Amino acid sequence: MDLSVVVPAHAAADDLPHCTAALEASDLPRDKWELIVIDDIDGKGPAFARNRGIEKARAEIVAFVDSDVMVHRDALRLILEHFQTDDIHAVFGSYDDKPAAKGIVSQYRNLLHAYVHQHAEGDVESFWAGCGAARKTSLAEAGMFDEQRFGRPEMEDVELGYRLSDKGFRIVLDPAIQCTHRKRWTLSEMIRSDFSRRGVPWTRLLIDRGELTNPRGLSVGSGERIAVIAAPLSVLSLVAALFTRQFVLFAIAVISWIAFIYSSSGFLNWLERIKGHAFQLAAIPLHLIYNIVAFSALAWGITTSLFNRSSRERYTRPR
C-alpha cells in the first residue's frame, strides 16, 4: 500500500459519487492505494474528519481529496511520484480551468482559485487539502489539523501548512496535479464565505502568529495587496465625489480604479484567454466585490482581535 486517500464528507450525497468515481478511474493501480471516506455526520468540520482519516491510514503518504472534487486520471500517480525524493514532505495541486458548475459566480470563484495555484509552481509555505498529500509522520510531528480551532471549513489546511513550514518541512505546489471543482456558488454565499470563513480567520491567524505585516501564502502578493486597497477606495471615493462634487475625489476614484484593474490584469487577461472577452468583462464586478470583501474581512479581523486582546488584558489585570 503506497497511498491512503482520505475524503472528508459532510452532506455530500450529490458530490461524493462523482468524487469516488474519478478516484477509481485513476491510472495509479488500485492495489497501490486505499480509499478512506470519513462521514462527518455531526458536522465537526473537515479538520476533524481528515484527522480521523489520517489515524486510519495504512500508508505513509496520505492524500486528501475534497468530496466536491474530481481528480484527473493522473493526479494520484503524480502525487506519489513527488514523494520519491526524501526532502518533500507535502505536495498539492490545482483546480483545472473547467469548473463543473455553470453560472458566472461559480465559474469566476472557482477560476480565481485555479489561477492562484496555476501561477505559483514550486516551493510554498502553506498547504491545500482540496487535492494534496503529506507524509503521515510529518503530519503527526506538526500536530495534524487543528480540529479544536477549526470546527468548520475555514483555513485549517493553510494553518497546517504554516506549522509544517515552521518545522522546516518542504511543501511543493505542482499545478500539473489537477482536479475539477464541482462547487456551486451564489453571490451571497461567495461574500459570506470569503468574509467569515476565509478573510477573518486568516487575518486572526496571521495576528496570532505575528505575521500580519509579512504574511505567507498564495494570495498575498503585491498585486493582490494593491487590489484589496484600491477596490474599496475606488468605490468610496466615487460615492463621496458624487455627493460632494469635489474634483479631487473623482481623481482619487479614477486613480484607484486604474490601480485595481492594473493589479488584477494578470488574472483578468487569463480569464479572457480561457473564457473570452465577454466573460472577462462580466467577471470584473465580481472581482471588485471579492476584493472589497477581502478588505472588510481584514479590517474586521484586526478590529475584533484588538478588542478581544484588550478585553482579556482588562479582565486578567491584577486589581
Image (cartoon, rainbow, N blue to C red):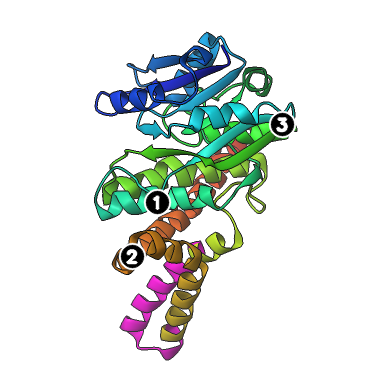
Residue wearing tag 1: 111
The picture places residue 162, in percent across and down from the top left corner, at: 64, 36
- Left/right placement of residue 318 relative to residue 129 reads right
Q: The residue tagged with tag 1: helix, strand or loop?
A: helix
Which amino acid type is marked by label 3?
A: Phe
| Residue 11 shows in the view | no
Residue wearing tag 2: 276
Residue at 34% x, 76% y: name it.
239
Residue at 40% x, 51% y: name it.
111
Which amino acid type is marked by label 2?
A: Gly
Query: Where is the N terminus found, in terms of image quarters?
Result: top right
Magenta residues, as a range? 228-249
Residue wearing tag 3: 169
**Residue 233 lies within the magenta run:** yes
Q: Nearer the viewer, mark 1 or mark 3?
A: 1
Q: Of residues 180 and 247, which is closer to you in this image? A: 180
Which amino acid type is marked by label 1?
A: Leu
